[in-house]
Image (tube, helix red, strand yellow):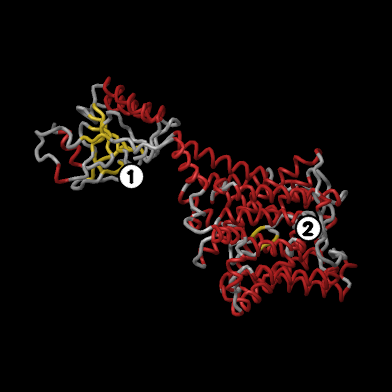
Amino acid sequence: MDGAPHNGIDICNDDNSDQRPNSPGMEAVAHKYKVLAPPKQSTVKKIKWKLKETFFPDDPFKNFKGQPARKKFLLAVKYFFPILDWLPHYKLSMFKSDLLAGLTVASLAIPQGISYAKLANLPPIIGLYSSFIPPLVYAVLGSSRGLAVGPISIASLIMGGMLSEAVNPYADPALFLQLAFTSTLFAGVFQASLGILRLGFIIDFLSKATLVGFMAGAAVIVSLQQLKGLLGITHFPKKMGVVPVMKAVVRTTNEWSWQTILMGACFLSFLLFTRHLSIKKPKLFWISAGAPLASVIISTLFVFIFNAQDYNIQVIGKLKSGLNGPSLDRLLFDGTYLGVTMETGLVTGIIALTEGVAVGRAFASLNGYHIDGNKEMMAIGLMNIVGSCTSCYVTTGAFSRSAVNHNAGCKTPMSNVVMAITVMVTLLLLMPLFAYTPNAVLAAIIISAVIGLIDIQTAYHIYKMDKVDFLVCISGFLGVIFISVQGGLGISVGLSIFRILFQITRPKIAILGNIQGTDIYRNLHQYKEAQRIPGFIILSVEAPINFANTNYLHERIRRWIEEEQSAESKVTNLQYIILDLSSVLTVDTSGIAFFMDLKKTIAKYGLQVFYIKYLLYQECFYLHNS
């Protein structure tokens, strides 16, 4: 036991049954072993070991050991550019699979790119730009075979909402675009820094309960924001809370367009039906994947043929053709907006990174390979840094696209290249065709995409398993829909951290009893068969003992003794306190002092204390009969 009590504190251990005393008249304790101090190590070695376990738990340099300099150089290049690892072995059969997957994902990426850009209050063309350059960068730097890169709804919503609080995107679109590119740069720098500095464990503070509640709340807000397009409303609030959105919907009934509502309802029903069909029959995934593009094509033709824009159906309007232009000169570091761009970059960067790494790991597990989370962070971060300089906004590995990519049978990141080339062709040749695409259909595409983020089944499972985790989940959900997206995220993360601190400072202590006829001891409150042993209080400490909880442990054990001694009808002739330390993995210097002080405190009550690493019934029997 690392850091276990020593210097004269005894631990009664009964691992070797053939050495036990065979009569109660022998020694009171079967064996007394002093826990030896671990082998001496220099301070430098200890610090080196701690740093290695903290920042390099996966030992990424193990393949470099014992290799010549040239081999190390090649391994280093492959480490930073994973494309060199799979491209030399690429085969035509793989390309056939990647070609089909890339074209299928592109059919989803094109309408989603346009829709998500509008969700971020950006020109629709920016969404397509963000589906062209970033996938190419990821294909070179990314290690996941099935991750499909592009904008995501949650990051788009957060960016649009946070930046709108500083600049009106409709009054000053040029300035708003500058802030979006600058926020993307900060997001990329933050993401890449986490990977380079091996600080990926920071995103682990976003627990599953936190993400479930946050994603559900964000999905509700995203869906409500699309009421503007579905109802044909022209005046809509910049705030993302459910209350201001619903107020705007009620107060602008005079702006509602029944033609827009009818079209939006029809296409939303179609998209939801295809999504339900793909869930029920996974082999028909291609129907759900192609439904958004089919909706765009059909609705655009309908508007063009019948001049529906003359009947209160709002359309995107003309979009310029051409590839991404440089945006390095559009990055804005003015002190007036520096705070909001850094904050937006930090929040969107965390959300994008969490989804990208989680999706990458999930599909890697399905296909039987491993990805390095820190390498993925560097890849996603560098992808966004390059994107900020090429007219793109925050991108990551999107769950919906990656699911389609996986189901379509992708083999390598080449599917991202195929998708990017398809988007490039669209940017060069097909942009005039989107001029008649109705906003109602784009709103329907967004709603059908984000509705899957509301995971009621997982939330119910969390409720059944852990009520505190469910509190974190529901707090994040309510915080997002009633306060703000970043506010809800902050509340749920804060509650998660508070719970960790509470578990550290108030560790669980259980009173154990023996299950008759066995050598097994279990919690009296969980096992009806467990019974107390007269003369004993057996306590199990189920956490590391450190400076944060020693005072609580001392006071709690003292209170137990006083309660037991006052309850003479329940416990008679109390003689021994036994601490079961089976679950205590580490003890710091404060913990060692705690054992010393506890021994003195218990002696004042006329009792003896024993520290047990493995508790067996015979040990208590010997003590009881001594």
482 sits left or right of 255 in the view: left
Q: Which of the two labelled residues, at mark 1 and mark 2, occupies the earlier sequence position? A: 2
Q: Nearer the viewer, residue 391 or 407?
A: 391
Q: Position of residue 388 (x, y in %)?
A: 76, 54
Q: Position of residue 305 (x, y in %)?
A: 87, 76
Which quarter of the figure has residue 268? bottom right
439 sits left or right of 512 in the view: right
Compared to residue 129, the image places residue 378 above or below, namely above
Q: Nearer the viewer, residue 233 or 469?
A: 469
Disc 1 to disc 2, C-alpha distance:
61 Å
Count of marks, rendered view: 2
Q: Are marks 1 and 2 in contact (CB under 8 Å)?
A: no
Q: Position of residue 83 (x, y in %)?
A: 62, 65
Which quarter of the figure has residue 534? top left
| Camera sees residue 444 | no
584 sits left or right of 362 in the view: left
Residue topped by disc 2 = 390
Q: Position of residue 554 (x, y in %)?
A: 37, 27
Residue 18's disc is: none
Residue 526's disc is: 1
Secondary structure category for the residue under label 2:
loop
Within-10-Å neighbours for mark 2: few <14, some 14–19, many 20+: many
Type of amino acid under label 2: Thr
Q: Nearer the viewer, residue 359 or 170?
A: 359
